[in-house]
Amino acid sequence: MVIKMINVDVTKLSSKGQIVIPLDMREEFNIGDKFVIIKDDHQFILKPLQDLGENFMDDLKFAKRTIEALGRYEKDGFKEANSKSFLIELEKW
C-alpha cells in the first residue's frame, strides 16, 4: 500500500482576486504555467493544464473525500489515534 502525504496550508484571496499558492506547494511549477480551476458549489480543484488527463477522476474523488472529512471535522472534531489505528481507518477510505 502506498500512502501519500497530504500537504495542507492556508492562503487568502487578494483584492485583485489572486490566491497565492504557498511556496512549499509550488516548488515543481514555473512562472507562466497554466492551470485549470474547477468549481463545484464551494469546492475548488486546481490542476496544472498539462496534467488534465492524468488521474483526473482520482482528483475529483480526493476532493469529495476531503470535503466530507471537513464536514465530519466541523460536526464532531477529529479523534486522536495511534499510527496503527490511523492506517486501519485510512484503508477504509
Image (tube, rainbow, N blue to C red):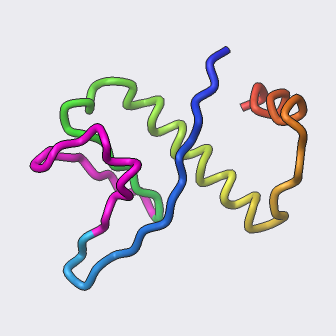
Residue 85, located in which quarter of the rendered image? top right
Count of all numbered marks drawn on residues in the image: 0
x and y, in percent, of residue 5 in the image:
59, 36
Q: Quadrant of the C terminus?
A: top right
Q: Residue furthest top?
A: 1
The residue positioned 88% from the left and 29% from the top of the image is 84
Q: Is 31 in front, or is 73?
A: 31
Q: Is 78 in front, or is 65?
A: 78
Relative vertical location of residue 1 with respect to residue 59 in this rendering, above or below: above
Residue 20, located in which quarter of the rendered image? bottom left
The residue positioned 49% from the left and 66% from the top of the image is 10
Q: Is 23 in front, or is 39?
A: 23
Q: Quadrant of the N terminus?
A: top right
Q: Residue furthest left?
A: 32
Whether residue 70 sits left or right of residue 7 in the image: it is right
Is 20 covered by the magenta stretch?
A: yes
x and y, in percent, of residue 23 in the image:
35, 55
Residue 54, located in which quarter of the rendered image? top left
Which SS type dominates the magenta stretch? loop
x and y, in percent, of residue 80 in the image:
88, 51
Is 36 covered by the magenta stretch?
A: yes
The magenta stretch is 19-41
x and y, in percent, of residue 89 in the image:
82, 33
